[in-house]
Amino acid sequence: MSIFSSRRERRLWTWTLIVVGVLYSTLGVTPKVAASLLSKNLNAALFVVGMMLVGATIISRGLKIRLSGANLGIVLGVAAAYVLVFVRFTSTEERSHLIEYGVVAAFIHEALEERARQSRPVPFYPLIAILATALIGVVDELIQHFIPNRVFDPQDIFFNTMAGAIAVAAIAALGWAQRRTDSSRPAQSSQPDQE
């Protein structure tokens, strides 16, 4: 019996591991890259691109690319929440946590949901996705403790967890709106109308 419930779940966990591997592998060079981007005024542009990609990930996951009037309102609400969080986060590092750990949480959530869809029960998978994201953030900070010029920062763990929670909440809100829209549509009859 395979550890994965489907090929799709395997792919999702593989992508999760790739993203986490990239996060961990860049810990030593991140401050240098951030300083370089800041000096070249590329930081804001790259952040906007990153947020657009996170938004696309969450929206495509939550809505399966079907927009309607009610769903559009939820999409705009999610986008507004991300913009407000962006405005409140003042440092590049805080903003990068929003992107990085939002993507990690989205992949973990999707992998766990796929597992549940394949009749392998995963209780409270949104909560598990947030907790797994937080754990990945703790490991991130533990690694930084051993890197010169880096420190273990509990506040970063909070930002990582918050980014994961925001992403999972956004996915849940979009999924709820989609299910609500789908359930309000009349069932299509496979038989032609007879008079």
Image (cartoon, grey):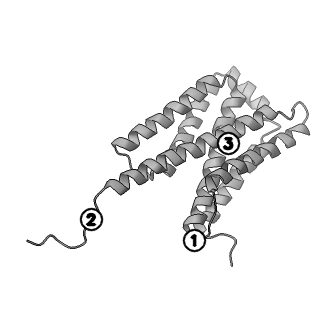
Q: Is residue 67 left or right of residue 171?
A: left
Q: What residue is shown with label 3? A: 101
Q: Secondary structure at mark 1?
A: loop
Q: Quadrant of residue 194?
A: bottom left
Tell me the residue at 36%/56% (across/down): 183
Q: Are marks 1 and 3 in contact (CB under 8 Å)?
A: no
Q: Is 30 positioned to the left or the right of 195 in the image? A: right
Q: CA distance from mark 2 to mark 3?
A: 40 Å
Of the two numbered discs 2 and 1 on the same chain, state the one appearing first in sequence: 1
Q: Amino acid at mark 2?
A: Gln
- Residue 146 can be seen, yes or no: yes
**Can you tell which of label 1 and label 3 is closer to the viewer?**
1
- Judging by the rendered image, the residue that carries numbered circle 1 is 119
Quadrant of the rendered structure where residue 151 is? top right
Answer left or right for 80 relative to 147: left
Let me know if residue 42 appears in the view.
Answer: no
Task: Using the image, determine if residue 68 lies above or below residue 118.
Answer: above
How packed mark 3 is, by other alpha carbons closer than 10 Å (few <14, some 14-19, many 20 or more), is many
* Residue type pointed to by label 3: Tyr
Q: Which residue is mark 2?
A: 188
Residue drawn at the location 70% of the way across and 20% of the way down: 39
Q: Position of residue 33 (x, y in %)?
A: 74, 31
Element type at marker 2? loop
Residue 31 at what x, y percent from top left?
78, 30
Tell which residue pokes out farthest to the bottom in this image.
1
Count of labels in the image? 3
Dividing the image into 4 quarters, which one contains the N terminus? bottom right
